[in-house]
Image: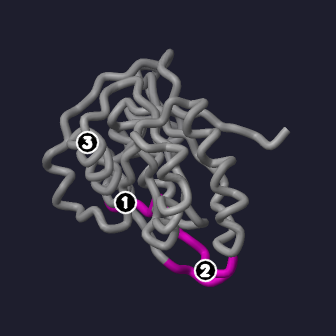
Amino acid sequence: MSGASIHPPESVGTLVDLLKLRVAEDPDRRMYTFLEDGEREGAVWTRADLDRKARAVAAELQALGLVKGDAALLVYPQGLDFVSALVGCMYAGVLGVPAPSPDPTRLARTAPRLAQIARDAGAKVVLVHSGLYELHEYLPSELPDIAWLVTDGITDDKAAAYVEVTSTADDVAYLQYTSG
């Protein structure tokens, strides 16, 4: 492996720039492997897979009217859907705000915390896996103006509608809330 593949050029200013560079260099190189139960190989994504899926999510955010600087709450179980949602936010210039995936048996208790994070961050949309979409039933009165986007149903062909957004190294990529 050459040093060029390890160290990006100094002209790469953002993670999005770096991913696009890596896609151009070697699109079929494995980027992510999700381990089912922490051991068994599950889904495998190449650099091109992540790029395409992230552009599709970004295009859907743009179709909802989100613009650079807007925020999106990300609520996902473990898996690659979170990765495409976070990178899709970065592609769209949208501030990704990851939140812990709630315990489905305690949604009535955990939903208010998610609502507080969404309000505090100024989230305009909740990006969610279809398995957690039922959360919207617990939050409508607390977040009446927020849109919901189930991202695991977004098809890769949506990537063609993505309009590139210029970001800089000074732009915030994501906002992490902690319990402490």
Counting residues from the N terminus, which is met first, the one under dot 2 or under dot 3? 2
Counting residues from the N terminus, which is met first, the one under dot 1 or under dot 2? 2
Identify residue type, mark 2.
Glu
In the image, is residue 79 part of the stretch drawn in magenta?
no
Q: Is residue 17 above or below residue 133?
A: above
In the image, which is nearer the foreground, mark 1 or mark 3? Answer: 3
Quarter of the image with the C terminus is top right
Q: Residues within 10 Å of mark 2 (few under 14, many from 20)?
A: few
Q: Is residue 175 above or below residue 26?
A: above
In the image, which is nearer the foreground, mark 1 or mark 2? Answer: 1
Identify residue type, mark 1.
Thr
* Residue bounds of the magenta highlight: 28-42
Residue 179 placement: quadrant: top right
Identify residue type, mark 3.
Leu
Give the alpha-carbon distance from disc 2 to disc 3, as whole Å: 33 Å
- Residue 167, x across and y down, in percent: 37, 22
- Residue 17, x across and y down, in percent: 38, 32
Q: Nearer the viewer, residue 34 or 151?
A: 151
* Residue in view at x 28 percent, y 54 percent: 52
Contact between marks 1 and 2 (CB within 8 A): the answer is no
In the image, which is nearer the foreground, mark 2 or mark 3? Answer: 3
Q: Nearer the viewer, residue 11 or 124?
A: 124
- Read off the residue under disc 3: 64
- Read off the residue under disc 2: 36
Q: Nearer the viewer, residue 177 or 56?
A: 177
Q: Name the element at disc 2.
A: strand
Q: Is residue 163 above or below residue 9?
A: below
Give the alpha-carbon distance from disc 1 to disc 2, as whole Å: 20 Å
- Residue 157, x across and y down, in percent: 16, 60
- Read off the residue under disc 1: 151
Q: Name the element at disc 1.
A: helix
